[in-house]
Amino acid sequence: MKNKFLFALMAVFALVACTPENYSVFEESPDERVAKVLKEYESILLGSENGWILTLETGTSGAYNHWVKFLPNNRIQMLSDAEGTSLSRFQGSSSVIYESSYRLKSVTTPILMFDTYNYIHMLADPNPAINGGDSGEGLVTDFEFSLGKYSKETKTLTLKGRYNKSRATMRECTAEELTAIQSGCFKTIHTNFIDYISENYKYPVVKLNDKKVDIELSSRTAALKFINENDEIETSSSSGYLDLTGAKSDVISSLFFLDPLTYYDINIDAIRYDSGKMFVQLEDGSKVEIVENGFPALPLRFGYKQDYTSIRTQPDNIEGSLDERFLTNVYNAANKSINGNGGRSLVYMNVAFQKNATSGLEEMKLVVRYKNTAGSQYNATWIFQFTKNPDGTITFTDRDQTGSSNERGQEPYVKLIPDYFCTFEYDGYSTSSKTGTWDQNKARVTKVTPHTFKLDWAENKTPGLSSSLGGFYPTEEAHLAEFGVLCGILN
């Protein structure tokens, strides 16, 4: 009987609890609450008199700034700093206002949707012709966002892309910033930043933990390159956005990173410009100057299956960088000599490392490219054997011709070039196809003088040349003094 009473009492409570008057703990229905939240966001968006600066992360090419003005009736006006790219579709995006529409709705969370095409859609467009991105991917970004918190202190609203999870922030634009934006600063800050880098740096480095570290800079990204603990080249990169300080004619904008640029335990938050110099700003606020190094700080890895496998020397292409001793005493002297052999002239010389298919040993191939008076070009090729020394230098111990008539016929005239690496002395030399085969000529070699070299970067002093240069630095003082350093463009 007692159990029956308790069961009946519980049933009564259940009926009372389920009555409409007592079901909801809120004074408003779910639909009313959602409408209220969306109304609050709409009030925030419309409330910025000068519009917003929307900074949007992409997955491939850094962050982009947009000026967005929210208007009544779900309309927006937009400008973009994407004009700071070479893509023709974005030309005018810093000055031509794109008007489109937006919507606020709730899909588990409040959502801001740019629901008609604008500059943000262009970044996400899957057509590579629009933004240069991958087919079907675009620049890997979003145009629909979950709305986060609005900070009254910083006047900033956080967003997150719904599809690619792209991070974005919207900060209320000031009157001064709006004036600058309307004057086209979205384009000029990128142009000035890129021009400053190209004019002041070929090989920028920054000293961290008492070591020079290569830093690569663009107006949306930066990267550090260094040798890690596993003796491997490691790259630490981060996306960023330019602030608007560069709207002033005598200032370069700062590049702020979405995530810190890291080097071991050092975090870099920004690239800052101050008084004609550029710095990295560490997380504690201290700054380290970025300086021009003349060549990369990374050690040169040059050889078979290394980062670089060949060096091409063509004096016209590296004017100002080639050692005057090598140019005069080797290349130009050989060019003058071959010119006396029927008016031929040198085009370039190329040094490459490879593996011999038969012996399996590494070897060096020297190609001297020359042309005749009719303009037809030919290759004369020598193969060098070498040893690697404990100190990292290499010694060229012997050389052979390939058996072609080109090197047999031209060696007497360009001999200074193969002799630079390993010098041969003959008691006689024949260019005849009958008496001057390579076996016959090599049998006449009376003395072989090996030469040892350190392979390292060469300073790029050629105006307008961005290629990395490498050099063969003779370790013998006499050889260095007379013939200098061979340098050329690395490949």
Image (cartoon, rainbow, N blue to C red):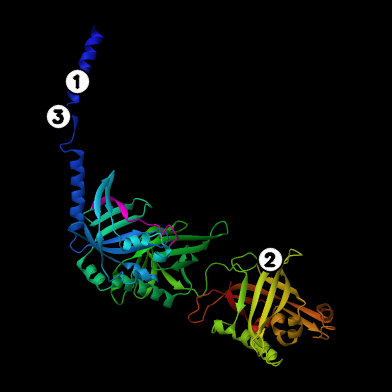
Q: Answer few, some or many: residues within 10 Å of disc 3's Cα (few below 14, many 20 plus, some between 14 and 19).
A: few
Could you say where residue 376 lies in the image, as x and y percent from the top left? 65, 85
Is residue 88 visible from the viewing direction of this image?
Answer: yes
Say if the magenta span includes residue 343. Answer: no
Looking at the rendering, in which quadrant would you find the N terminus?
top left
User: What's under tag 2, amino acid-wise?
Assistant: Pro
Vertical position of residue 382 compared to residue 64: above or below: below
Vertical position of residue 292 compared to residue 340: above or below: above
User: What's under tag 1, amino acid-wise?
Assistant: Phe
Q: Residue at x 21, y 51 (%)?
A: 41
Which of the marked residues, 2 or 3, is nearer the chain's N terminus? 3
Q: Which residue is mark 1?
A: 13
The quadrant holding residue 423 is bottom right
In this picture, which residue range is highlighted in magenta? 133-150
Residue closer to the observer: 192 or 252: 192
Looking at the rendering, in which quadrant would you find the C terminus?
bottom right
Residue extending farthest to the top is 1
On screen, residue 119 versus residue 355, left or right, reads left
Q: Residue at x 52, y 78 (%)?
A: 460
For numbered disc 3, what is the local secondary structure? helix
Q: Which residue is mark 3?
A: 21
For numbered disc 1, what is the local secondary structure? helix
Residue closer to the observer: 144 or 175: 144
Gap in angstroms between the C-alphas marked 1 and 2: 90 Å
Q: Residue at x 71, y 85 (%)?
A: 414
Q: Which residue is mark 2?
A: 390
